[in-house]
Amino acid sequence: MTMIQEGYEYAKQAYAKWGINVDEAILGLKRVPISIHCWQGDDIAGFEVDAQELSGGIDVTGDYPGKAETPEQLRSDLEKALSLIPGTHRVNLHAIYAETDGEIVERDQLEPKHFKNWVEWARQHQLGLDFNPTIFSHPKAADGLTLSHPDPEIREFWINHCIASRKIGEYFGRELGTPCLTNIWIPDGYKDVPSDRMTPRVRLKDSLDRIFAAPIDEAFNVDAIESKLFGLGSESFVVGSHEFYLGYALKNNKLCLLDTGHFHPTETVSNKISSMLLYSDNLALHVSRPVRWDSDHVVTLDDELREIALEIVRNDALDKVMIGLDFFDASINRVAAWTIGTRNMIKALLYAMLTPNDYLKQLQEEGNYTERLTLIEEFKTYPFGAVWDYYCEQNGVPVKEAWLDEVKAYEQGVLGHRGKQEVR
Ligand SMILES: C[C@H](O)[C@H](O)[C@@H](O)C(=O)CO
Ligand SMILES: [Mn+2]
């Protein structure tokens, strides 16, 4: 028996004492797809022929060499990361990742054909695809207003871009046999205190109504809307706030997408999941890591990540919560960033599955808070790592930090030859 198997056998016994079947947990874990955002690989640059500077109140900092500069490079980097991450997952694209053969195609004119390479690639690698209209980094978003813009022509442009995006999402879903989550996020807001909050929100509501009035097959495309609290340049007011989209989603049967970086610093998404699931069949997440602000740091296995996973698992919501990632760190190797963040999300789910959730619920009902706290704390040092190692081995991906050697080799062999910069 190898050390990994020995560790697994020991862990199985430790968890079995609490009625937790570890074999079942890892079978369940394998069925959970994580939607991995492509934009970590190229600092949200995209491949538009007339690409603009990143805008929309988001920013990527760092200058680590080797970022992907072509669709082929980005797909190759994603493949590398996926080979280091256990399980079968999804890739989340933005409209700026269209391939238009050197032609300038305006965003409202984008069509499924501009994503056929992505679909072929996804099919080859058994990946689902998710999608986002890109409503920033564009001259028509230069003043920070888009779907709520006072100018009807600008609104019209973005409405048509969103309709085109939903059709692309529908194409992904139909081609790949798994529905695409098409998520709308807009940066609209004001740097300073607005004198009218209602009018922009009325316009945004009207724009959404028009976007969703365009017929789409919900078997292939599922719509989501993502709220935000503030951004760079929209510090005082964001049109698409949480309450705005929560109301819109409930009334119009859309998915609310909660980005963990889009709330007040002490406000947690983990605390919202149960409330939202009482009124909505599904919801979507952008798991990120805010550090003081919506800084989109790489996801770590911190308390909030575990709490999010616990809320999903103990409420039987693995089929209801679409888990996506959203971080972009250009100060470290980008393939490593994907690998760290995604492995952590999966680890958190495993941790939650290896928690005696029913018994802990019972303790709470009985008012036995002493035992509740005791077990929550003691389970933090149960042999969860041994199960994780076994899961990685079973899935043919490197165990523990061994994946970093592969990333280093990839950096030496591939990333280091990109651009003019030298690998550190
Ligand atoms: C690039 C993403 O769509 C973007 O990060 C958005 O989801 C967001 O979270 C903006 O803060
Ligand atoms: Mn997000």
Image (spheres, grey):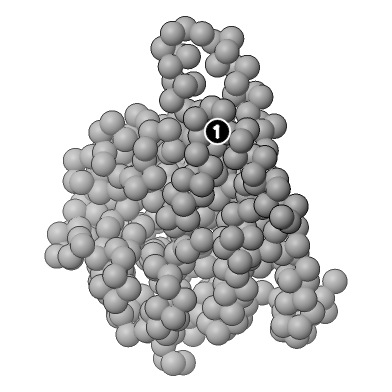
- Depth check: 212 or 255 in front? 255
Q: Quadrant of residue 114?
A: bottom left
Percent position of residue 410, x then y: 73, 77
- For the view shown, which residue lies furthest in the right direction? 424
Residue 7 in view (yes/no): yes
User: Residue at point 42% right, 44% down?
Assistant: 258
- Depth check: 1 or 360 in front? 1
Going by the image, does 369 lie left or right of 301?
Answer: left
Percent position of residue 223, x then y: 28, 56
- For the view shown, which residue lies furthest in the top direction? 367
Residue annotated with mark 1:
16
Going by the image, does 239 lie left or right of 70?
Answer: left
Q: Is residue 327 above or below residue 97?
A: above
Q: Quadrant of residue 115?
A: bottom left
Percent position of residue 103, x then y: 42, 91
User: Residue at point 37% right, 37% down?
Assistant: 316
- Depth check: 106 or 405 in front? 405
- Secondary structure of the residue carrying numbered label 1: helix
- Which quarter of the rendering shows the N terminus? bottom right
- For the view shown, which residue lies furthest in the front direction? 1
How many numbered circles does the render carry? Answer: 1
Q: Is residue 372 above or below residue 79?
A: above
Q: Is residue 108 above or below residue 23?
A: below
Going by the image, does 96 lie left or right of 108?
Answer: right
Percent position of residue 57, x then y: 53, 54
Q: Quadrant of residue 113?
A: bottom left
Q: Amino acid at mark 1?
A: Ala
Q: How many other residues sit within 10 Å of disc 1, few (<14), some (14-19) or many (≥20)?
A: few
User: Residue at point 65% right, 46% down?
Assistant: 8
User: Residue at point 43% right, 38% down?
Assistant: 312
Residue 234 in view (yes/no): no
- Which quarter of the rendering shows the C terminus? bottom right
